Image (cartoon, helix red, strand yellow):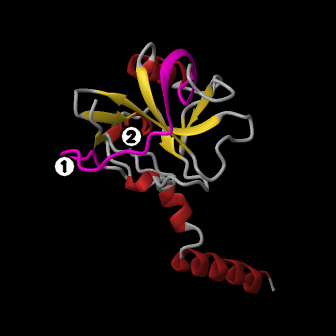
Amino acid sequence: MKKIVFWGIVSIIVFLCVSGFIVIPLIRNIDNSSNGYTAPIDPPIDPPIDPPTDPPTSEIEVDDTGTVYFIVDGDTFDMSGLPTTDRVRLADIDSPESYESGYQEAKDYLYSLIYGKFVYVDIDDVYGTGYYERWICVIYVRIDSDTVMNVNYKMVLDGHAVIDNYYNEFNPYNWKLYYLHKA
């Protein structure tokens, strides 16, 4: 009787090994860091975004303009010139929160892009403001007399934010970095 139980257990183990139920999970957890390679376990959520190489082509929609006077974090800031609240949330991107790694770097980077600068604002035509009563916008800053830069997209391209595509008028997967907009 003991031989039957023993060979039954051995048969089950062999079956599981052959079918991959035991071997594959063991292989996935092997640490290859000694040879400089660590395989990712989960695929990235967002598709990779290649920086645009084409020249600016299309005009932008400008709902308002103003000057940035305070940076809250990597995706929120205050500016003058808006109809009600001065608080703006960059549409369809998400930067690290204050308790997450990269928070200060994202905040400092947004500061370097727009603080004290005159910006062009495309306010979401679907909702206008979000849950926290911040204007949901794509922001543009002038880089020369004919061209503006999409700040939302720049934050993503340079690794300080990720795309978080909400239901609104914007489609971040169609953004370009530079747009024509005469001064």
Which residue is situated farthest in the right direction here?
Answer: 1
- Residue 141 place in picture, x, y as percent: 37, 28
Residue linked to disc 2: 33
Left or right of 27? Residue 50 is left
Q: Determine contact: label 1, label 2, CB under 8 Å.
A: no
**Residue nearer the viewer, 89 or 21:** 89
Left or right of 120? Residue 134 is right
Residue linked to disc 1: 54
At x 79% / y 81%, what residue is drawn? 2
**Residue nearer the viewer, 176 or 42:** 176
In the rendered image, which quarter contains the C terminus?
Answer: top left
Left or right of 172? Residue 126 is right
Q: Which amino acid, by three-letter code, is at mark 2? A: Ser
Q: Which mark is residue 140?
A: none
In the rendered image, which quarter contains the N terminus?
Answer: bottom right
Q: Which residue range is magenta in the image?
A: 50-79
- Residue 108 place in picture, x, y as percent: 46, 17
Q: Is residue 14 above or below residue 60?
A: below
Q: For residue 52: magenta?
A: yes
Q: Is residue 128 above or below residue 10?
A: above
Secondary structure under badge 1?
loop
Alpha carbon distance from label 1 to label 2: 39 Å
- Labels 1 and 2: the sequence-earlier one: 2
